[in-house]
Image: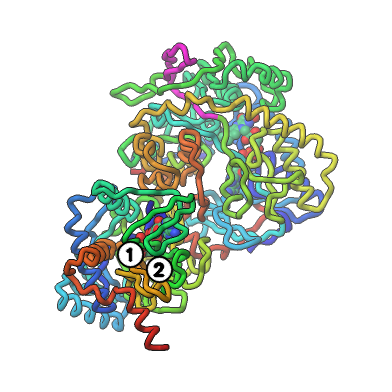
Amino acid sequence: MASGATAAGMGHLVVMDDSPAQLALTQYSRSIWRELMAQLPASVEYQACGTIWVAADEEEMVEVYAKSRICASAGVQAEVLSPAQLANAEPRLRDGLAGGLLVPDDGVVYPPAAAGFFLQQAVQAGAEFLQGSDAVFASQGLVRLANGTTLTADRILLSPGADCSLLPGLPIRRRKGHLLITDRYPGFLRHQLVELGYLKSAHSTEADSVAFNVQPRRTGQMLIGSSRQFDNNDAATDEKIVRQMLQRALAYMPGLGQLSGLRLWTGFRAATPDKLPLIGPAGRLTGEVADPSLWLAAGFEGLGITNAPGAARLMADQLLGRISMIDPEPFLPNRFVAQETVYV
Amino acid sequence: MSDGTVMVFLNGASVVVSAGSTVAAAMWNAGQPCRISVTGEVRTALCGMGICFECRALIDGRAHRRSCQVVVRDGMVVETQR
Amino acid sequence: MTQCDVLVVGAGPAGIAAATAAAISGRRVLLLDENPAPGGQIWRVGQPMPKGQAEGQTAKNQAIARLCACGASCLFGYSVYDAPSAGELRAICESGEAAAGPVPGDPHIVGLRYEKLILATGARERFLPFPGWTLPGVFGPGGLQALVKGGFNVAGQRIVVAGSGPLLLAVAAHLRGYGANVVCVAEQAPLAKMLPFAASLWSHPARILQGIQYRAALGTAPFHLGCWPVAALADEVSGKLTGVRLTNGKRTWTQHCDLLACGFHLVPNIELASLLGCAIQDGFVKVDHQQRTSLAHVYCAGEPTGIGGLGAALVQGEIAGLASAGKPTDSLQGRRLAERKFALKLEAAFRIRPELRSLARPDTLVCRCEDIPYAALEKRSGWIDAKLQTRCGMGPCQGRICGAATETLFGWKQTSVRPPLMPVPVSALVYPGLQPVSLKEHL
Ligand SMILES: Cc1cc2nc3c(=O)[nH]c(=O)nc-3n(C[C@H](O)[C@H](O)[C@H](O)COP(=O)(O)OP(=O)(O)OC[C@H]3O[C@@H](n4cnc5c(N)ncnc54)[C@H](O)[C@@H]3O)c2cc1C
Ligand SMILES: Cc1cc2nc3c(=O)[nH]c(=O)nc-3n(C[C@H](O)[C@H](O)[C@H](O)COP(=O)(O)OP(=O)(O)OC[C@H]3O[C@@H](n4cnc5c(N)ncnc54)[C@H](O)[C@@H]3O)c2cc1C
Ligand code: FES
């Protein structure tokens, strides 16, 4: 359980505004997380710490203002910080930064425990959980497991993270990331801090990139990221990119250098060409002939924790023929089929 | 000090210990815990060889140092890691 | 970046023998250890023993004298924490003179390039959870021995030495040398298992106890075989250790004491070998008769290849040193084989009895870094599941202590060693290899 990207990710619950669809899904999902807040067990480590987008220079401050306007029009609370307000909010940031944007309702969870909580709810509602054996075949209402078991169902929902071995045709590329966790330093930080340059890093579709992204955990630990590399399937840590990533972090917050670093690891994000997830019937995405039994919830890139509850509602709405709170259209997998048809 | 001892500050109290002692030994001899665990238990050294991290202490302002691996220095300031 | 032909990690008996053999064979050798002086666990230097001569001094002095004469360079006080690329290791010095850089106390980091690498990283003690094992005053036997060498005062203290392995007697003797009152030694292995072996041990005590006589180790204190601790007891008000409940399976009694030294034989330090990608078999680094691992340029000697004690460490180290220098090792193969047989006997004699798996109560902590109780772990399906769902093994020891315990308790295998091998300042992962090192001054 929770052994894929969910075991490797940061668990930042963040509203992202790079496209209207992404904004709608992250905002919707974040509101569900906030509704769940009271029910989440302590092990999920939910914290409403907020995000501060850090602007290094005036150019990035222009982006801060643009972002704050988008937030305002979408009804997402956000507050522009002056250099003094930024320093006051996070005194360990280096001097000379241009300011920032505080998004107070963003939060942080510990993803494996969150997945454990969702699983427990599913089991309580009657789902059966089989673990320990990979699915080696899934099509036309039939799933075969490596241990020989065969399962049949009207609908098969595939949510394999960045492991596309069952459906090699999916428009998903693996995007490797590194993270470093430190020992406990309670009070070192208060907010999740992300440099605005992160947006450039996250959106660049080819080059390797790093960005300053540091998160205070409820344990008092600091989780330091982040890196993005395409077409690197090696789960081993890559010292060059780690060095760049940490150099970047230290450039924003020199005091991180003295903290004791416990463990470094990697994970794989599942990236789609348009940076939006695939939520809905697989249709003809998985073969010449549409397979009505196959459904997808995949391709969440760096937002799969944030978007998990929203994606689940969209999926349930479609399965039950209900109307969704947000437009499901931009996430339908067949958007990629349509595109190909145009080219041909 | 020239008599084979050094003076260190353990949780605010000045303590004379023999030169060459490890901080973990000095803390035990002075009855000071190395650290307070995540759930509030008092802990002292266990493995003595830098593996278990039970002897972590705040040494000269640096948190989470393994006190069994650090030799006392004159004027060193040591506090229980909380 | 410092360059050498043969890099030896670990300056215990195995590493010393390896470095000496390779240097005598004309290789440029660098021997590195995280301790401030050579010797490893068994020959650890420290505060002088007030009563009598420390054990095994002659063997140690000879080995160190040969090391000093052989021309190997040494780097002490440095821990290897990363293997960033093939043929390269990173090491850090966090305290001591070398660390006194421009900013005092800042760590000193070196990059080391090698053609051949010999891993002689030794072993650590195995700890098993029982009620009270986290109380102050409970130590590993080897741990207490090391702490005593570091100035920990045990004079007049009543000490119970318990657990398993030949180390118990060695430690008891050592503690008595520092004036401790060893009240009893409790070995979990049953009499039936120990007797034939013990007889052979005592007839060749030098093998494992380096010349300590059995009685010297114990004085008048009883040596209980087939006896193990079930709980450490503390005063409710002061929290001070007052004693230990011991059992032989039939009878359980309280033994009063001030300190309890308890450890269950040894666990090999295979983390560096795993990080490099050496094949591991049944928990030990797999080697051939030349001590070569599954990686062509990497050798391994001493405890990581099988818990075999001093004799095995010395002969394996010498073989690894010679082999890394391309020299024949035929004349040593007989001794190697004999030591191997001895190691298998050791393993069989000190096998952990099943009763020790059920000492923990639901609220007994298993992971000491994160304070995870037995009850939380019992339900998990394996090591990764336990880690992710309970934080067991996620603290700074990275499962070095609780991983060995959960392997005994639940049969879980630990997976994926990641850099850094031990916690290091974040800056050590940013600017490594930039600082020069002058080697000679460290010998
Ligand atoms: C470094 C990094 C940082 C991140 N930070 C954040 C963040 O801050 N916020 C955020 O919202 N998101 C973040 N993410 C992204 C987020 O972690 C992922 O989007 C999310 O975990 C994906 O969840 P998933 O369930 O789709 O996939 P996974 O968690 O990968 O789960 C897929 C599961 O399917 C199983 N599986 C696959 N194939 C088969 C098969 N054939 N048979 C049986 N089982 C199979 C796998 O074993 C796995 O358990 C980050 C990701 C990374 C790598
Ligand atoms: C705590 C303890 C106490 C012991 N006491 C005794 C005793 O009193 N009598 C007895 O007969 N046997 C004792 N033993 C058993 C003894 O270790 C073996 O019998 C034998 O001496 C092992 O030799 P070795 O060279 O393989 O390992 P060791 O002597 O353990 O040497 C390994 C060396 O490698 C170093 N090292 C490991 N990893 C790194 C790294 N990443 N970077 C740098 N350096 C590293 C360690 O600091 C250590 O000095 C003890 C074992 C332990 C664990
Ligand atoms: S006592 Fe174990 S690390 Fe210091």
Residue A200 sits in quarter: bottom left
- Secondary structure mostly seen in magenta is strand
Tell me the tag on residue A132.
none
Horizontal and vertical percent for residue C124? 56, 37
Reading the image, the residue beneath label 2 is A270
CB-based contact (under 8 Å), mark 1 and mark 2? yes
Residue placed most toward the observer, B17 or C45: C45
Q: Which residues are magenta?
A: C244-264
Residue placed most toward the observer, A142 or C270: A142
Question: Taking C341 as reference, is B30 left or right?
Answer: left
Please tell me which residue is depicted at 51% across the width and 52% down the height of the picture. C416
Horizontal and vertical percent for residue A249? 40, 67
In which chain is the residue bearing label 1?
A: A
User: Is the residue at mark 2 in contact range of ligand 1, meaning its CB lies under 8 Å from it?
Assistant: yes
In which chain is the residue bearing label 2?
A: A
For numbered disc 2, what is the local secondary structure? strand
Reading the image, the residue beneath label 1 is A304
- The amino acid beneath tag 1 is Gly
Question: Taking C112 as reference, is C423 left or right?
Answer: left
Horizontal and vertical percent for residue C349? 62, 24
- The amino acid beneath tag 2 is Ala
Mark before the other along the chain sequence, 1 or 2: 2
Q: Is residue C113 above or below residue C360?
A: below
Q: Are marks 1 and 2 on the same chain?
A: yes
How many numbered discs? 2
Residue C247 among magenta residues: yes
For numbered disc 1, what is the local secondary structure? loop
Please tell me which residue is depicted at 72% across the width and 54% down the height of the picture. C6
Q: Is residue A56 above or below residue C24?
A: below
Horizontal and vertical percent for residue C338? 76, 32
User: Is the residue at mark 1 in contact range of ligand 1, meaning its CB lies under 8 Å from it?
Assistant: yes
